Amino acid sequence: MREIQVNLSAIKQNYRELKKLVAPVSVMAVVKANAYGHGMLEVAKALEQESVDMIGVADLTEAISLRQAGIGVELMCWLLEADDNLELAAVHNVALGISTMQQLQSVPNSVSIHIKVDTGLGRNGFMPGDLDQVIEHIQTNSLDVRGVFSHLANTSEAEDKKQAEVFDQALAKFEAADISVEFRHLAASAGALDYPSMRYDMVRCGIAIYGLNPFEDKPVEGVVLSPAMRVTSKVINLKSVLAGQGVSYGYRYRASKPTQLALVPFGYAEGMPRVSEGAMVKIGSELFPVVGRVAMDQCVVDVGEASIQLGDEVVIFGDALNGEPTAEALGLSSGSINYEIVTRIGGRARRVYLEA
C-alpha cells in the first residue's frame, strides 16, 4: 500500500555531477539522519563504490554503525555530547568535529580532529576569540588537526561573505601557528553551488546528493541533479459524494459540487504533514489535490470526474521531470522544506532500493 523507492544510481550520479562541478575540491557526502531518510547504510555503500572522498554523519553512534557495517572510507562526525566515549573514535577510525574545550581536552591523541569555528551561525563551534586557547592546547598536546570547518547561515550573500571573512581570519591563526590543515571546509550544498570562492579544500553535500534543491527561493543552476526518492501509495477506496460533503476531521473541506473522493493509505504516520491540505498527488497522468486534514493513516484526494480505479498508483512525490509532484512542493504545502519531508518520510512504507 505504501512504498518508498530510493534510486541509488541517481545518488551516485548526483555525486559524480557535484564532483565535476567543484573539481579539484573534495566532496564530503553527508549521510546523517538515515541519509536524509534515504537509508544511511545503503547510501554509504553506494557512495563507497564511487570512491567517495569522505562521508559525514552527525553523531558518533551513526559513525560507529557505519564502521560496524563494513564502511571503510574516511568518516567524520561533529555532534558530540560530554558523555561520549571518544576512545571509540580511535577504535573505529572516526574523525571528530570538535567544538568545545571539554571535547578538545577529552579527545585521544590518536584521533584526527576537525576544529569547528562559529563564524556567525550561532550554533556549534568555538568563538573566534577562543582560538588562541584552542591552538595552544593543540600544540601542547600534539593533536592531529585534519581540518578546520564552519557552516554558513545562508541568510544573504552579504552575510555569507562576512562569515567567509571570519573563517579566513581563523584559518590565518592556524597557519601562523604552523598547524598544517588538510581540509578547510565551510560550504554545504547551497554554498558549494553558489560560491566557488568558498569551496576551499572540501565541500559538504547532503541534500544535493539526493537530487534535491538546497534553495528555498531559486532553482539549482550549473549542475543537473536527479531526485533519488519516489514515494507512492494506492487508491483503496473510491466514492461519489454530493455537493456539501465534508471531508476528514473538522470538515476543513467541503465538496463544492458532486465529485469523487479517493482514499489513500498514507498519513502523518508515514511523514505526510498533517497540515498539507491542497498538496498535489499524481494518479495516472493527472495531478489531484489532497483535501481535508491528513490523518494518521490516510488522506483523501478529490479526483473530480476522472477515471480512477481501486488499486491505482498514487505518487506522493517524485521527479518533476516525470510530471510528478515534488518533495519541495509537499514541503511548501505544509510551511516546511524538502529536507524535512524526506528526512521524516517512512513509517510503515516499504523501502525498495533501485539500481538503474
Image (cartoon, helix red, strand yellow):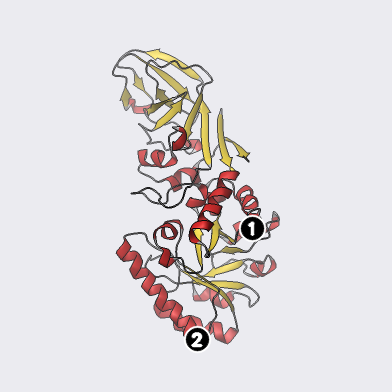
Q: Nearer the viewer, residue 168 or 145?
A: 168
Residue 97 percent coordinates (x, y): 53, 68
Residue at (45% x, 48% y) in the render: 339
Quadrant position of the N terminus in the picture: top right
- Asked whether the viewer can see residue 348, the reply is no
Q: Position of residue 110 (x, y in %)?
A: 66, 75
What residue sits right under mark 1 in the picture? 51
Identify which amino acid the numbered label 1 is placed on. Answer: Ser
Residue at image location 56% in from the left, 78% down from the top? 105
Q: Residues within 10 Å of mark 2 (few under 14, many from 20)?
A: few
Q: Is residue 349 above or below residue 135?
A: above
Dot 1 alpha-carbon crowd within 10 angstroms: few under 14, some 14 to 19, many 20 or more: few
Would you identify the image quadrant in which residue 304 lies?
Answer: top left
Residue 263's x, y, as percent? 46, 22
The answer to whether residue 247 is above or below residue 149 is above
Total marks placed = 2
Would residue 64 appear left or right of 286 to someone viewing this image?
right
Kindly identify the residue that appears in the image at 51 percent across and 17 percent down. 310
Front-most of residues 130 and 302: 302
Residue at 58%, 75% in the rendered image = 106
The reply to whether the C-beta atoms of the residues labelled 2 and 1 are less than 8 Å apart is: no
Q: Which residue is mark 2?
A: 177
The C terminus lies in quadrant = top right
Type of the residue with mark 2: Ala
> What's the distance in space between the residues labelled 2 and 1, CA to CA?
33 Å
Q: Secondary structure at mark 1?
A: loop
> Which secondary structure lies at badge 2?
loop
- Camera-side residue of 272 and 353: 353
Q: Position of residue 211 (x, y in %)?
A: 49, 47
Please tell me whether residue 185 is drawn above or below residue 169 in the rendered image. Answer: above
